[in-house]
Amino acid sequence: MGRLSGPLHDVAQDAGYEQPPPRMGFFTDTSVCIGCKACEVACKEWNEVPEDGYLLTGMSYDNTQALSASTWRHVAFVEKADGPALTDLGMPGVGLPGAATAGTVHEDQETASGDSAVRWLMSSDVCKHCTHAACLDVCPTGSLFRTEFGTVVVQPDICNGCGYCIPACPYGVIGKREDDGRAFKCTLCYDRLKEGQKPACAQACPTESIQFGELDVLRERADARLAELHAQGVEVAQLYGRDPEDGVGGDGAFFLLLDEPEVYGLPPDPVVTTRDLGSMWRHVGAAAAVLVGVGIASFAGKRG
Amino acid sequence: MARGGGRAEQAMVPDVEFESYYGRPILKEPVWKTPDVPLYLFLGGLGGASALLAEGAALRGLPALERTTRLVAAACAAGGTVFLIHDLGRPERFLHMLRVLKPTSPLSVGSFILAPFATLSSVAAGSQLTGLFPRLGRLAGLGAAAFGPPLATYTAALFADTAVPIWHEAHRELPFVFAGSGAAAAGGLAMVLVPMEQTGPAWRMAVVGAVAETAVVEVMERRLDMLAEPYSKGFAGRLMRSARLLTLSGVGLAVLGRRSQWWRRAAGVALVAGSVTTRFGVFEGGMESARDPKYVVVPQKARKAARESARWAERTAAPRTG
């Protein structure tokens, strides 16, 4: 069964693999994401994920909306108007010298609300391949399993579409394909990993915002990148899902964010639901015992 | 950026400021169907507690009560199984539920409770109806009575073992809500169907169950605090209020009309209705809890902030002690 919560170094070994390869994962550095959505396209193409509707949402450039059974990479676009004030770079103006003061906002740059400094955040979201994965824990058929790479994968030939994994995921990643009946999510390109290849999204990413590799290496690289950004004065930069002490034991796919997690649609402090499994079963047992007690007590007394 | 929760309906608590991604849900709403799943929960409670009543009735020699509750238990098991299978995305693969037994999956454990319960309660009911193999029937009934109470309460773990805040954070109370609700339904239905001279035990089980159900729901809502909001707003709120009204009027009718067959029947109807409405209320509350990102962001941010300030306090306190 393995451990249910807390830090766990060798997740594949805990799942029963004797000599597993190193744990593989993603480090998505959103500070260099340009929002090209090549990852979304590459994922769909490689994994033959069906289309899931064409809809203009009005949510910036995001018409994908969220991760789902048929969206395994999702690029979020956040437009925030409360960014830092523009710095005067002394750029040449238009028209006569001195006609426009450098640093002030030109009329054509102004938004309807009068905001001048819009921060545009982009982030490619994906299944987190948690150390303690609730979807896998609650799956009653064994369809969801831990691979030798420490990732979490659904076996479509086993899944019976009970849907339990869907509300269990603290990130709202896994979904059900309504016309198919089964649950689907990112496999971290299990087929490609077995051939020693990069997952399709990481392969397609033009800026190396999506980095694939051994999780230990990625964590070191992320720490260095965070330190670099902090040194440059980007105080808002933070790692998300990097900490093995967090509520899910750390994510196999973690992120560098430039704002609070909820701004990107991520839960601020996710906890794997099965952390409380012992307490749940104890209370279920106690309640069943009380019911037996009530049953027995009911028969003490008059018949009518 | 979207701020605030959106759907503003009779705000009980002043709306909390929080950030989200265009107000979109963070969690995925459960894809479980209604009425399948709420009815499955109800039937599990009704059937499980009925199996208990049946064994008691057999021991104390109350043949009418025994006969009815055995049939109710078997019918619930059959109906519940149908609902459970119908809810699957791939119903033809329902036997995959029995491929493995996983204690981390309440649905897996539940399948291994439902399967023997359905078998045993059917054998007991069959023997009761036909008069064949009476000893085997009694033995099966005893088995059904053993699997009945876990069948009535495991569904609480089924809901609690998710990321849905209103369900998960109530994992201590929900099993007792469902146990009470099951007892109220089983006792209530027996009060409707069985001649009054034999419904003493059913009456006691129903009243205790109904009082427990109402009281524990109250405790649960208080402990959930802001997370309980869906139980007092919108559709789920209407269901929970109706459930309380039905259950409490059932208790009132049962106590006041103790000596009248018809009052008992009316009380039984109200208690069964209260029980089924509670299940629908809890189900719909979970849907709303998953839909609104507020119930994820606000408590999680508070938890994170508390942890960080504790860490900060520890760090600043250190030099003084050292």
Image (spheres, coloured by chain):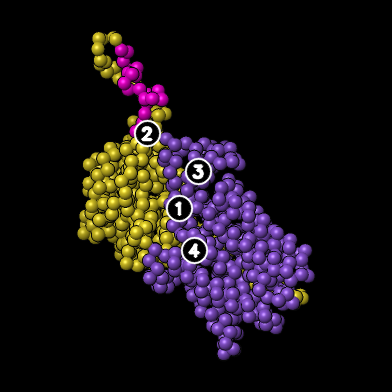
Chain colours: A yellow, B purple
User: Closest to the observer: B177 or A29?
Assistant: B177
State how far apart marks 3 and 2 are (Cα): 20 Å
Name the residue beneath numbered marker 1: B29
State how far apart marks 4 and 2 are (Cα): 41 Å
Q: Residues within 10 Å of mark 3 (few under 14, many from 20)?
A: many
Q: Chain of mark 4?
A: B
Name the residue beneath numbered marker 3: B294
Q: Mark 4 near mark 2, Cβ–Cβ under 8 Å?
A: no
Q: Residues within 10 Å of mark 1 (few under 14, many from 20)?
A: many
Q: Mark 1 near mark 2, Cβ–Cβ under 8 Å?
A: no
Residue A273, horizontal then vertical, whole percent: 48, 56
Residue B90 drawn in magenta: no
Q: Which residues are magenta?
A: A100-122
Question: Can residue B128 be seen by looking at this rendering?
Answer: yes
Mark in the foreground, 4 or 2? 4
Name the residue beneath numbered marker 4: B36
Q: Secondary structure at mark 3?
A: helix
Q: Which mark is residue A79?
A: 2
State how far apart marks 1 and 2 are (Cα): 26 Å
Among the 4 quarters of the image, the one containing residue A294: bottom right
Mark in the foreground, 4 or 3? 4
Q: Residue at x 44, y 57 (%)?
A: B31
Q: Quadrant of the C terminus of chain A?
A: bottom right
For the residues beneath circles 1 and 3, the answer to whether they share a chain is yes
State how far apart marks 1 and 3 are (Cα): 14 Å
Answer with mark 4 or mark 3, whichever residue precedes in sequence. 4
Residue B294, horizontal then vertical, whole percent: 50, 43
